[in-house]
Image: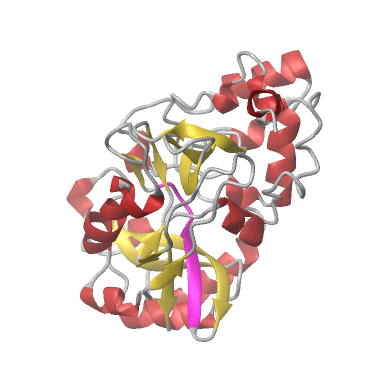
Amino acid sequence: MNRKNNKVMPLMAAGLLFVMITCISCGEKQENPGEESGEETVEIMDSLEEAGIQESAEETDTAGKIPYEDEIAAIAAASVGDIVYFGSYEQDNDTANGTEPVEWYVLDKADGEVTLLSVYLLAREPYNKENTNITWEDCTLRSWLNDEFYNETFSEKEQAAIVNTDVVNEDNPFWDTEGGSDTVDKVWLLSLGEVEKYFGIPMTPESDPLYNNTYIEVCEYAIYYYEQDSRVCAEPTAYLAAKGGSSYSEEDAQYYLDNFGYDTSFAVGSGVWWLRSPGDDSYSAVIVTNGSIVYNYGSPVDYFNCVRPALKVAY
């Protein structure tokens, strides 16, 4: 394969903000993170309200905690695609009122366990603090997630319910970059293969219907990915947005509508988030851009991009 000629050619269009991987995309937190799970979210929220739990994170007590027993009860009652609460983390950028319950999509449910992915982008970290040859096994982001984030976000009871998960680190199928050794993690990031598994977005050269079309516009890629599953496009919390960085704006969306005829308003406010898969070499890791494009070429590992944790919980 000629790597330079085939690396997701649509993404090389000049001036397209979707692939400005040097930018840290942080926007405003919105009430409804995804259309597809709206009804299910209401049902879960109703069950929490019946259990005496406040309806929103902003209305919880200053400790920002939902009782563990209620979290687990809601998780046990949830279906794939629902949103549940588990753990708490600073999100509203008001540290005086304590942390807020973390919202998670239920990606999978089987054998008394659920696989969860955060609804919002919760943190901003480099994949690795040094620009060096690295894989998921040894990167500093893995250490941060399984130590600082894990201990800050989850109580002892919640930690006891989090499953030690066998994480398979496959090679990048577009570039044959080695994924490194498999790991066992409490908290991890999605891989290219898991984006395909959970979002239904083709993540191999063979399965991606747009990959070999060198004339397709980058906006078409963004729209195609978003239409497969809108959850691929994620927004940062207000706390994360306040830390600075650029975001995909209404002005950006209007530019592409006026000049290229594509409506990319769905991406407004979205951020760039890491996957754990390597990029075109082991000095980079794959990202999902602020236009919902899974950028398999990757971002340099020492760049700061947003973090969207995943984990398994036993109920």
Residue 284 visible in this rendered orientation of the protein: yes
In the displayed structure, 279 sits above or below 46; it is above
Q: Residue at coordinates 65% horizontally, 49% vertically from top-left?
A: 230
Q: Residue furthest left?
A: 96
Residue closer to the observer: 274 or 121: 274
- In this picture the colour scheme is secondary structure
Magenta span has 115?
yes
Q: Is residue 226 left or right of residue 297?
A: right
Q: Is residue 262 left or right of residue 41?
A: right
Query: Image quadrant of residue 73?
Result: bottom left
Can you say which quadrant of the picture contains the C terminus? bottom left
In the displayed structure, 180 sits above or below 114; it is above
Q: Is residue 279 left or right of residue 66?
A: right
Residue 51 visible in this rendered orientation of the protein: no
Residue 212: where, in percent of width, then height? 79, 34
Residue 122: where, in percent of width, then height? 37, 48
Residue 35: where, in percent of width, then height? 65, 53
Residue closer to the observer: 121 or 307: 307
Magenta-highlighted stretch: main secondary structure?
Answer: strand
Magenta span has 236?
no
Can you say which quadrant of the picture contains the N terminus? top right
In the displayed structure, 117 sits above or below 32; it is below
Q: Residue at coordinates 40% horizontally, 58% vertically from top-left?
A: 188
Residue closer to the observer: 152 or 163: 163
Query: Image quadrant of residue 292?
Result: top right
Q: Residue at coordinates 44% horizontally, 75% vertically from top-left?
A: 48
Segment tinted magenta in the rendering:
113-121
Q: Residue furthest front?
A: 1
How many circles with numbers are drawn on the protein?
Answer: 0
Residue 223: where, in percent of width, then height? 72, 37
